Image (tube, coloured by chain):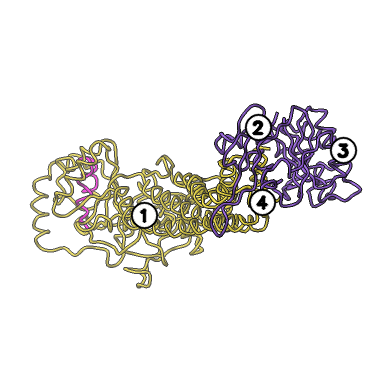
Chain colours: A purple, B yellow
Amino acid sequence: MLRLENVLKTFPQPGGGRLTVLDIPSLILEEAEQVALIGRSGGGKTTLLHTIAGITAPDSGIVEVGGVDIARLSESGRDRYRAARIGYVFQTFNLLAGFTALENVRLGMTFSTGRHDVERAKMLLDRVGLGDRLHYRPSQLSVGQQQRVAIARSLAGRPKLLLADEPTANVDPANQQSVIDLIRQTCQDERITLLLVTHTTEVSNQFGRIEHLETVNRIFQTA
Amino acid sequence: MSLLQIAWRNMRQRGLSSVLTLISLALGVALTVLVLAVYGIIQDAFLRNTSVGYNLVVGAKGSPLQLTLNTVYYLSQPIETIPYNEYLEYLPQDERTRQAKLFEGEGIVDTSRDGKFAPYMMGGFAIPVTLGDYFGPFRVVGTTPGFFNQLKYGPNVDLDFEFSAGENFITDDPQHGPYTAVIGSRVAADMNVQIGDKIDPSHGDPDGHGHGVGFAIVGILKPTGTPNDRAAFVNIEGFYLMDGHARAIDTEEESNATTAANSVADDSTAISSDVDKLSFSPLPIRQRDLTAILLRADPIFAVKMEKTIDKGLRTQAASPIGEIMGLLTLIVEPLMQALLIITAITCVVAAVGILVSIYNSMNDRKRDIAVMRALGARRDTVLAIILLESLLIAVGGAIAGWCLAHLGILSASGFIEERTGVQVNFLTVTQTELWVIPLVLGLAALAGLLPAVVGYRTDVAKNLNP
């Protein structure tokens, strides 16, 4: 489902030269596989997810999602592909403040299917336990509820690959496990490949496969 | 969600700023629509006033515009007069003969022929008009009963003059003789006079001395929305008999009159039985002057007739519609254009307001844009959403402004109708007005372009919180 090969991503440095953030010889995830990627803060986890999602393009290498090398697509091609195939759960939720829970989820469909399937949006919110909070704004929801809306939104476009960037980092401990359960269960039900980034072993230990960024990313080995 | 819904949500999120921008645009649009509507009303009023039921005005040589303003609108200074004989040139032989008999014109008027221009009339008519006196601030018009019997008015020139009280005057009233009058609706209201009251025209200007002759009001016109609402019409025979209205006769004219009388004597005698009898002694033709002659001629011949009249030494013919449209084009249109430019500038300023309002919000919205991009929105989708937001404000402002302007027009509709005769309601739309909406939308699209480009260029990775 996901294949990264010789992916190199650098950023220009203020003083000149370029800083290498990602140097990944190989990373492969099978269809419907659930993988936890563990690594310390500042280790390039977010850049890796952005690269897989096509938000940023790598300097070189192959980023193949569902058989398509998105690194070779144009920016709009990557946008289109991301909308159609990839779901993204952010650490800070990134809900739009002016939109209700239902609208935030529908927004997830707007750019993917182009269809306005309100019933699916309602079903997803119901599934994450927010069937009675459809018309609440993010500010009217608890942090845990906001993350549930974000999860529902990430699933709205029927993705094949779900990228979750520390989804429990801003959730209170009481709700952390339910968020993880929700993501894993949903991905299992809909046969979605999951790559979940975390920095806690409590979360990563629940996964059958754990990848360490220090192992995956060659820059740590060089250092 | 559709892009429009997303744009609407964004707009609502910046509620106060959006509303203030919308109000400023609405005021700009309202001003523009008002100016256009006023221009439409002026144009309509001008055209309505030229729909007077006659296609030519004949008067003394000089400015055709002044002749039109004087005769049609009862404005401007009175122009030179023309002899009554000129009027007779538009009448058929029998009418010439009748008038010659009636007004001591035998020997002066050649009754052996039709009037020189009579063949061009083709079922039309000629109505004499004399001006120069006032009733209060209103012009007194000396004319014949034909003014109200033959002329029509209205947009299609098919409406008969109607009286809210009384009736039209006749040449020789059994009770008042030639001293009868019909007054326009405004005159009746402003001067507070009614049927049976007498008006004493003052000579030369509104503050001039009165003639000491009372014209009994026998009819009050219903409002027509024409300048006739602002005039007092007196029987031309009574007008002539007022002090100072008879033309002095010179010796040469007397001599010519004698010669002419010898040459037409036989014909005059032949139809003398048709001549009416009057209970008063009318002013002789040779002492009669006219300010103008209102002509309804066959439109096919009107142009030729106008040229032929203009070739003469004494008189000119003016086409009221042509003159008034010329005036409209020359003076009113440039004024309106200047006003329109000023109001258009206010629209541009309001559009700049849209730009500033959305542009200022862009910093706060970069994260939202980045989120949408991360969800798969393409750059051009973001561009479209911001442009739609600008257009939503423009549509709201344009509709609110249009309604505001038309509510203003509606509230003044009574006044407008009373003063101009133009009927307006909330949905009265001028053609030019229809351009305002697309123009405002175009301006809004331009105004939204800069923030839209900023949105288009937003770096997702930089603005997306992890």
Q: What residue did someone put label 4 on?
A: B367
Q: Earlier in the sequence, mark 4 or mark 1?
A: 1
How far apart, in angstroms, are the residues tagged by discs 3 and 2?
A: 35 Å
Q: Quadrant of the N terminus of chain B?
A: top right
Q: Is residue B83 magenta?
A: yes
Residue B333's disc is 1
In-front residue for pair B125/A47: A47
Left or right: residue B434 versus residue B332 is right
Give residue B152's position: percent from left, percent from top: 39, 43
Disc 2 versus disc 1: nearer the observer: 2
Give residue B466's position: percent from left, percent from top: 72, 49
Q: What residue did someone put label 2 on?
A: A114
Q: Quadrant of residue B26?
A: bottom right
Q: What residue did someone put label 3 on?
A: A206
Which amino acid type is marked by label 2?
Gly
Q: What secondary structure prevails in the magenta region?
A: helix
- Circles 2 and 4: CB atoms closer than 8 Å: no
